[in-house]
Amino acid sequence: MNLKTCRTGVLALMLVLPLFGKNTAAAQGRTNWTKDGNQYYKISSGEILLVDARDASKKTTWITKQMLTPEGQKPIAVRRFTLSDDGQKVLINNNTKRVWRYDTRGDYWLYDLAAKKLSKLGGKLPESSLMFAKFSPDGNKVAYVSGHNIYVETLADNSVKQLTTDGTKKLINGTFDWAYEEEFDCRDGFRWSPDSKNIAYWQIDASKIKNYLMLNTTDSTYSFTVPVEYPVAGEDPSMARIGVVDVNTAANKWMNIPGDAIQHYITRIEWTKNPNEIILEQLNRAQTESKIFIGNVSNATTRVIHQETNKAWIDGKSRWNNGNPVGWEWLNKGKDFLWVSEKDGWRHIYKITRDGKETLITKGNYDITGIDLIDETGGYIYYNASPTNATQNYLYRIKINGGKEERLSPANLAGTHGYDISPNGTLALHNFSNAYTAPQNELISLPAHQHLSGDDIKLNDTATNKTEFFKVKTVDGVELDGWMKKPTNFDPSKKYPVLFYVYGEPASQTVTDTYGAGMNSMYNGSMADDGYIYISLENRGAPAPKGEEWRKSIYKKLGLINIRDQAMGAKEIMKWPFIDSARIAVWGWSGGGSSTLNLMFQYPEIYKTGIAVAAVGDQLTYDNIYQERYMGVPTNDEGRAPFINGSPITHAKNLKGNLLYIHGTGDDNVHYKNAEELINELVKYNKQFQLMSYPNRTHGIFEGPGTVTHLHTLFTNYLREHCPPGAR
């Protein structure tokens, strides 16, 4: 499940829960399969089990609570774990703390199965300070980050060596600043060399990044500021460079990478199969040019082996296997690798050689949506796509050298499929849901997709009042996907109020055929029972698998083209005989809050009531990586114009309807200044509205006793008062 929140993507699950962010790693992340692919490890009741994937009833307790009990203490809880390459040592993460969004800081323990010994790592370093601990390839050492420096611990004697010494809150070794973490999903910032002798790592210099000062007025008698390093659009990014440090001597060298280290991003580094080489991707600041370098560690030189440009932006994250910028998809003993590009107008898989020669693998007018497995032994790439329905997702495979793709997901299960495939490509943990079928999980064999154990997956044939999917064509000739949840006991001869749910920005879809489409947990009770029609439309610019032109038509038009699509779609819907055009409401959170404001301000004749949560009112206040990706770099008045034109505060003077605006004063993502800029504009033009500020709450507005209940009650009461429910 995708949990917490950010502006850069309100996922489909937000339709069930008010989630406001991009993909959150699960407690353990991807499944720990055994090397043969026939078994996997699973956390259960504080222990680690070994499960036979061919028969899930066959499970043994591999790591017991007794093994996890330090002398004189209680058993340690297992948050996540990894295994050494030989499977004889287990690295256990617990006592974790949040770093901005995720709990990436904590304690690490080692259990040695051969020695039957449990030991805590980190020496005298502070409690819950270790990050991204991982085994060396030879299994003899573990490296980790603490206090923005990199350490290595020798497991034979638990001796700890500090490899970098200059780390501070602003000079960051082995991990990242706020913007890199938030917008590139970069968190783990160091990599072991294949021979276990060196570590390559990012160093981020955020010393020139200005702090946004959040104001805490409730946690002490006197108010105090909470600084957040935050580079807004138009401000220079942090400097990034790549170092390689010798594990034995701590001698360090910096790789010579062409290009201004401030005006470029380094989004991904790994080692090649050669212990003297690294490979990395560099994006220019505008994110319109990607270069892949191979670096020689001995002399610190680099050379470009591949480059690509785009008139809009390079969608770098679509290249990452399962959305994780760790790992490199090598083939042919490191002579080739896989890469994902939209260069032909569709998101396709390419094979690239070390000298830059590329071969298109997937072909046709469709997008892949992710890569699940590269089975080089079997000769296949397993990937996700939905060529004929952008709201759904299915598993395909194709020969590594190309050919005709083969759909593996069952034809009779229309909806959204997910897979965690064993290393040998013969087994998979399969999950499925659609708008009227709750999530189900099973173990299957591949490629036959034969059920082996778990849920007997089938559609919910008894579901009533199913969420309906539809298409609507606007006056501009744009066809939009949508879903609609009609009222219980719907009477087509009567007219009903409509609440539109909107996100609208390039980071996430809302119209997906997943369980939760048509539900709204922000509303106390059942919207359908109370007589509301609930609708969501997918505008151009949303990351639906409908081709690059669909996704990137929003370039430098964020806040305009997506808003027009939504409004023109709503106009077509208002022609339906059962729609009450006098009762049209809209709501959204984060980027959806921004869209809600723009819809209320730019099309006040359509939307009579709006509820906007944690919205960006002024695009020039949001972080540079996200906003400049979609709007360009605002270096002059001409460059600033698109940001201004698409910002809600520019259009606030046009408000006519009922507006409820909600924001947390402790929002480190979309700062509270957006609320106050918006308030100033509305006051300036005597536009009456309602405001709810939640003291010290972050972007998710969930902290503190009673907060979620209060928020939901506020939402429900406001909607019911200003857009009354029920048929007329």
Image: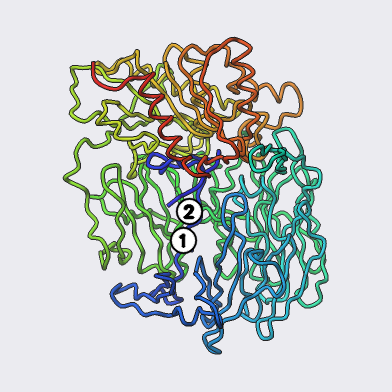
Vertical placement of residue 259 versus 548, above or below: below
Q: Residue at x 61, y 14 (%)?
A: 683
Vertical placement of residue 68 versus 282, above or below: below
How many numbered marks are there? 2
Which residue was labeled with disc 2?
A: 361
Inspect the image, locate mark 1, and give the three-letter code of the amino acid beneath it: Ile
Q: Answer whether labels 1 and 2 touch (C-beta < 8 Å).
A: yes
Question: What color scheme is it?
Answer: rainbow
Q: Earlier in the sequence, mark 1 or mark 2?
A: 2
Q: Tell which residue pokes out farthest to the bottom in this image.
A: 115
Foreground residue among 82 and 424: 82
Which residue was labeled with disc 1?
A: 400
Vertical placement of residue 251 versus 329, above or below: below
Q: Is residue 330 left or right of residue 513?
A: right
Instruction: Count residues near mark 1 (Cα–Cα under 10 Å), then give few for <14, some for 14-19, many for 20+.
Output: many
Q: Residue at x 44, y 28 (%)?
A: 587
Q: Residue at x 76, y 66 (%)?
A: 244
x and y percentages locating residue 121 in the rendered image: 64, 75
The picture quadrant where one finds residue 278 is bottom right
x and y percentages locating residue 70 in the rendered image: 55, 80
Element on which disc 2 rests = loop
x and y percentages locating residue 684 in the rendered image: 63, 12
Between the residue at mark 1 and the residue at mark 2, the CA separation in whole angstroms equals 7 Å
Vertical placement of residue 692 versus 263, above or below: above
Element on which disc 1 rests = loop
Inspect the image, locate mark 2, and give the three-letter code of the amino acid beneath it: Ile
Instruction: Count residues near mark 2 (Cα–Cα under 10 Å), then give few for <14, some for 14-19, many for 20+.
Output: many
Q: Is residue 214 left or right of residue 329?
A: right
Q: Residue at x 42, y 30 (%)?
A: 715
Say which mark, if any, is on residue 157: none
x and y percentages locating residue 71 in the rendered image: 56, 83
